[in-house]
Amino acid sequence: MEVIYRYDGSFDGFLSCVFDSYAQREIPAGFDSGEDGVFSLFDSRTVPTDPGHAARVLRKVTALSPEAAVLLRRGFLTCLPEKELCLFRLTAKLLREGPGFLRDRSDETLCPVVKAVQHLNGEVHLLKGFVRFSELGGVLGGEIEPKNRVLPVLGGHFCARFHNERFFLYDRTHREALFHVPGRSVIRPLADFQMAPPDEAEARYRLLWKRFYDTIAIKERENPRLRMTHMPKRYWGTMTEFQGEDWFRPRSSPAGVSGPGAPAGISAPGTPPPPSPSAPGSGP
Amino acid sequence: MDVLEKLTILTDAAKYDAACTSSGGSRTAKAGMIGNTSTSTAGCCHTFSADGRCVTLLKVLLTNRCIYDCKYCVNRRSNETRRAAFTPEELADLTISFYRRNYIEGLFLSSGVFRSPDYTTELMIRALSLLRETHRFNGYIHAKAIPGTSPELVERLGFLADRLSVNIELPSEAGLKTLAPDKTKGAILAPMRQIQTRNRQSREELVKFRHAPRFAPAGQSTQLIVGATRDTDFRILRLTQGLYDRYGLKRVFYSAYVPVVEHALLPARDVKPPLLREHRLYQADWLLRFYGFRAEELLDEGNQDFDPRVDPKCSWALAHLDAFPVEVNTAAYETLLRIPGVGLTSARRILSARRVGPLHIDNLRRLGVVMKRAQYFLTASGKMAEGLRFTPDSVLRGLVAAERPLLPRQEGVQLSLFDPPGTA
Ligand code: SF4
């Protein structure tokens, strides 16, 4: 009888499913963490999360191959379709055959997981650079819109780099945020978040950065296609240099400061041209 | 003049310098300091500019005032252009504020020669000390050592920066004499030697005393301008090799000359920067550093310039067809690396995967081998890719087609397959 496992969506929950399938000697046909509300013709069974069971599975996997344990942990954060099933198959094969096949990247069970983890790692690598923080009253805040659940991995990088700072990083896709104060950090679900408008100083630094960005490009070498290959457009939405005029306007002056475009540079798409000299900032 | 305007002028004046990676540094987070550099394997790009180049560092000049008159440079004394100078305070504030917002990985500070090399370097040292000591900045700093600076100042600069560079710019002494009359080969090489020596000493001291101060821990680099003079690729590549061998450089950067000024000795202003040539040099440079190639294998007196149609590795393989095909199940790592389409990672994966069982052609793509290029040059378990029929000519055509979408655009499209070598 084919059965779908319903679980709470946590990593421990998934490992508990693995434990149960061995205890019941059955192979799940799929996993349901409640998010997608999949409709299925199969029977489903709810597997309660049991940290003890989870730890036993993870210990076993780690003993066989520490590398596989990392793949499971990371693989669980990816956006691989039916990731649980792929990870389940990987675990089952590892328990059945031992870790030999892990050295062959072209292995059918291993390949999709490794690829997905690489995609995650790639996204983390890019975001280490592409994240933009704003300073809001002494606290740094930023937003991202990743495909994978990168926060647990990316968080480590920023916590080390800004260990003395208070900051948060909001993941719009997965609606969760990392909060950090010196010495401590947590990831919490956060249904909605709106960045407050900048104060004078913050708006000023944003503008300075945009000016730098627009000026550093060499006209004779302009190559938008190459830029797009290295920095896919889906990242642009949260990057300072691609924001519209509003982003550079401090909250105290509704009419705005001089426009962000650079006189000698290549304006990033979505930016209004610099104002002509006859139109100075018209504050109230 | 306000900071926004200064930033505009001093960025514009700095942008033709190619070097902008932050790799090789490792500063772990320190209590009481802000930042680290953890990009040990690949430089961290914080954005890509409209020309597709990676932006890692805040790359600006301290000032574009200059007492020298290098013909190829926008900042030269005789050029009429707006001049500006940051104060050390402004520069330090910009850097730390950009860094905290994660706009940048650190600072790349260069400068025109303001009053004298020593005077300029002292200003740079002030800015960097402010950053390190007052702002507690622990991120990456790349600073230019200006030829002619006294050794004591280079020394102080080296203890503040992660990487130092002295730009050679012109690949030959003759070029230097005509185009950069204020600089001499000796004045360029002296600080390079000093940096190499101090860097080595400081690493030896670090072994003995864990807290010994570190001198330019990420080593040094330099830049060569390509296309401003008539120097050939062979000359440039041999110079590069010498710099890696004898001066222990970490990187040599190449910069396609953008004609920014009109001068009788330089290419006219409407000449396009030789992007494809620059690209080929970077490819060859990579082969020198990671693939065990020597400059003399890639080019020689009879072939002084790279074939614009195919990359240097393919070009080498086509000239050595007798060394192929290579059997991936038995070949040594070094031999695998010589197969076009096999890179460092895929070669390592082949080594690891073939211990599990014999590899077949189907496995290779999943191991990351670029079969479009590699198929002509390898066998797996004695077999080539199925249905593959080729002659030396069709190999060349296949290789050209495989690389075309990846080439710098302006020149890539003009290359015709059927041009005889040497005219394209
Ligand atoms: S010394 Fe440097 S800034 Fe001055 S003209 Fe020569 S290359 Fe330009």
Image (spheres, grey):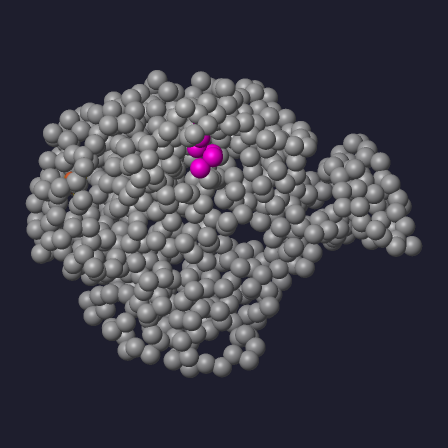
Query: Which residue is at the front of the view, B265 or B362?
Result: B265
Residue drawn at (16%, 58%) of the image: B268
Point out the quarter of the image occupied by ligand 1: top left
Task: Tell me the residue at 46%/40% (across/down).
Answer: A244
Magenta-span inclusion, residue B322: no
Q: What stretch is highlighted in magenta?
A: A245-250
Which SS does the magenta portion mostly show?
Answer: helix
Quarter of the image for the N terminus of chain B: give it: top left
Q: In the rendered image, which quarter is residue B234 located in? A: bottom left
Residue A247: x %, y % from top left = 47, 34
Q: Is residue A9 above or below residue A116?
A: above
Please, is residue B168 above or below residue B374 in the view?
Answer: above
- The residue positioned 28% from the left and 33% from the top of the image is B5
Q: Dividing the image into 4 quarters, which one contains the C terminus of chain B?
A: bottom left
**Residue at the right extreme?**
A1
Q: Inspect this view and state whether residue B364 appears.
A: yes
Residue A83 versus residue A133: which sits nearer the camera?
A133
Determine whether, in the image, residue A38 is placed left or right of residue A210: right
Q: Residue at coordinates 54% horizontally, 74% vertically from top-left?
A: B385
